[in-house]
Image (tube, rainbow, N blue to C red):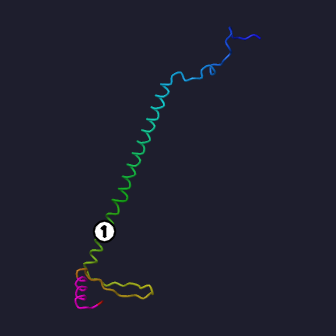
Amino acid sequence: MAHANPGNDPVTTPFEAQTDDPEGGSTWFISLASVVVFIAVVLAVCVLYFNVENRLVEEVVTDVPVKSFQDGKQVQLAQLASYEKYSETDPDGKTVERIRIPIDRAFEVVIARQAGGATR
């Protein structure tokens, strides 16, 4: 049997001959550097995402309703400081006329009733 291989060397392919990593240090360095860069990129994306999300939450939740709450509070305070007639519908369907009085006057009425011994 004639071989194209001169000498007594067994016939091997280049892949069979090299079974070991020639330079382990460079492979470790590249692997560790890649992991560090990957972790840094993931952390940077998380920080950017949550900063944008927090700013959006502050703008939408905190800033917008404050104006409507302040307006509602002003309306309620105006109602507490004035006399007004209004009607309510009871659960049985009967309409009842009510009178709203200023809260300071209501305190005086309650204190006068309690001092007089009235229960209601």
Task: Left or right? Give the position of 117 relative to 35.
Answer: left
Extreme residue in the top direction: 7
**49 up-or-down from 58: above or below:** above
Check disc 1 and give the amino acid type.
Asp
- Is 46 covered by the magenta stretch? no
Residue drawn at (25%, 78%), measured in percent from left and top?
81
Q: Is residue 58 left or right of residue 115?
A: right
Tell me the chief SS of the magenta region. Answer: helix
Quick one: 99 or 42, which is closer to the camera?
A: 42
Note whether 57 is above or below 112 in the view shown.
above
For the N terminus, give its image quadrant.
Answer: top right
From which residue to which does the magenta span run? 105-118
Q: Is residue 85 left or right of residue 43?
A: left
User: Where is residue 40 shown, x and y percent of the image?
Assistant: 42, 38
Counting from the top left corner in percent of width and height, residue 80 is at: 27, 78
Tally of marks: 1
Give percent across and percent down for residue 59: 35, 56
The residue carrying pointer 1 sits among few (fewer than 14), some (14 to 19) or many (20 or more) residues within 10 Å by Cα, namely few
Q: In this orientation, which residue lies closer to the viewer: 76 or 11? A: 11
| Residue on which the image places disc 1 | 71
Q: Position of residue 43 (x, y in %)?
A: 42, 42
Which secondary structure, mark 1?
Answer: helix
